[in-house]
Amino acid sequence: MSLLMIPVHLIGKKILIVDDEFKIRQLYSSALQSEGYEVFEAADWPDAAKFLISQLIDLVVLDIHVPIVDGVCMSGMIGEIDPKIKILVASVYPLSHQRRLIIDADDYFDKAEGLHVLVDKVRNVLSSAYIREVE
């Protein structure tokens, strides 16, 4: 998608990708940057916390199985730092399992679904946040 087709309220939104797999972070980062988002990457909680404290993150794309602090615990810690940060769970677990593990996430993504689905879900989560802010 070209930047001309992206709603202006989404350009420059800050997304943090938390995944212990370097190649996954790179793949997601590249796809989301091409959509106009500012993207940060973290492999674990200590790295993620640095970005959550130093940047105004709009959305975290969060894997469940990460070292040190897993995604389940991390989702609660993100909410304590800033409850307005949206969370999109991205995992190899089936969506039903993801929903049971992290019940308060804004959306869920099965890594087998493909990048276009991830990009659509990111856009939808961030758009719904924008609509709530405007209302």
Image (cartoon, grey):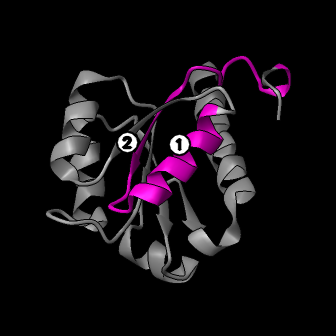
Which badge, 1 or 2, comes first in the chain's sequence?
1
Using the image as rendered, state which of residue 24 and residue 130 is in the foreground. 24
Position of residue 131 in the picture relative to residue 111 (left or right): right
Amino acid type indicated by mark 2:
Glu
Q: Are marks 1 and 2 in contact (CB under 8 Å)?
A: yes
Under tag 1, what secondary structure?
Answer: helix
Whether residue 105 appears in this view of the structure is no
Q: Quadrant of residue 127?
A: top right
Q: Does the magenta segment cover residue 12? A: yes
Label 2: how many Cα within 10 Å (few below 14, some 14–19, many 20+): many
Residue with the most extreme front position? 23
Region in magenta: 4-33
Residue at 54% x, 81% y: name it: 96
Using the image as rendered, state which of residue 67 and residue 101 is in the foreground. 67
Using the image as rendered, state which of residue 9 and residue 114 is in the foreground. 114
Q: Which residue is mark 2?
A: 41
Q: Does the magenta segment cover residue 49? A: no
Residue at 55% x, 64% y: name it: 108
Amino acid type indicated by mark 1:
Ser
Give me the disc on residue 29.
1
Q: Quadrant of residue 71?
A: bottom left
